[in-house]
Image (cartoon, rainbow, N blue to C red):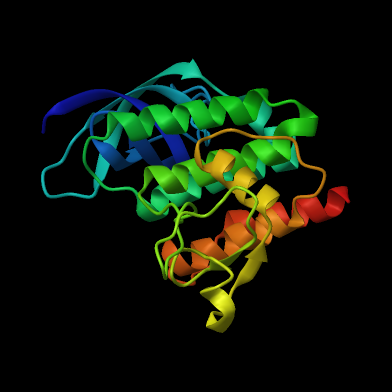
Amino acid sequence: MPSVSTPAIILQAFPYSETSKILRLLTRDLGLQSVVAKGALRPKSRFGGILEPFTEGTAAFHARENRDLHTLGGFDLIRSRQALGFELTRFGGASLIAELVLRTGVEHADPELFDSVRTSLNRLEQAAPEALETTVLAETWSLIARFGFAPALDDCLTCSRLIQSDETVLFDYAAGGVHCTDCGFATAGRQVPPEARMVLSAFLSGSAPPLERTAAHWKLLSRYLGHHVLDQTPLRSLEFLAAALGARQ
């Protein structure tokens, strides 16, 4: 029963019996791992109430061979990110990042993914209120690109012609990219003007340009995820974000 110590971010936490918790961790050295924190719900728990979603620390656990659930031995706090829970959009954005990783992540070492998720959560925690919504969109799209699901925006999917910067294109959800207007007349999709395509390209690189209206970008993101990442299975975090953003309007 080897002991493992690795940087980790808690993506999900839920009760297990009356006194314990199960945590889903993204670790830097072992990818996604599940651990049970025995006694974590007791009033005088040795974990001190820090085992909450988005908390970052060094996790020590006993790895059980051929088992999916390990026993947490210790968790040394590095960053709690409590501010993510103080505002609904911040919390929803962080939940969206976590849920995407849980849906698409794999159980092997991926230090670049760990660092990317850590940076995304930090940016969501620190974003100014007026930039928060576009920051959520940018961090989500850049994570999609990190997983290899980025849409093709530069060339027409049909004729392979380079799309000019001032062209309106047709976004094909099923094909995962755009068609020029000459080729897209028979394709079902969404018309995307040049400004919106430039914004989407910026999102994929992690940039968050200011936007006055975001509704169309949320619809595009939701439909694209359904086609290429989630196999039409809804994300609870996206539904939560839709309700939170609706309440703000």
Would you place residue 9 above or below residue 150 in this image? above
Residue name at image x 66 percent, y 52 percent: 194
User: In the shown orientation, is residue 248 left or right of residue 223?
Assistant: right
Q: Residue 77 location in percent, x, y? A: 45, 17
Q: Is residue 32 left or right of residue 39?
A: left
- Residue 102 shows in the view: yes
Closer to us: 141 or 26: 141
Residue 98, above or below 222: above
Direction bottom: furthest residue: 186
Number of numbered callouts drawn: 0
Q: State the image coordinates of residue 235 (x, y, percent, origin top left).
A: 55, 60
Q: Is residue 82 left or right of residue 54?
A: right
Residue 87 occupies quadrant: top right
Q: Quadrant of residue 72?
A: top left
In the image, what residue occupies the spot 21% across and 41% down? 108
**Residue 13 image point, x, y percent:** 48, 43
Quadrant holding the N terminus? top left
Q: Is residue 17 at all visible to an observer of this figure?
A: no
Image: 33 above or below 191: above
Q: Residue at x 55, y 22 (%)?
A: 80
Query: Of residues 13 and 93, which is closer to you in this image?
Result: 93
Q: Residue furthest right?
A: 249
Residue 70 location, x and y as percent?
A: 25, 40
Q: Nearer the viewer, residue 102 or 180?
A: 180
Query: Residue shown at 44%/42% (left/top)?
Result: 21
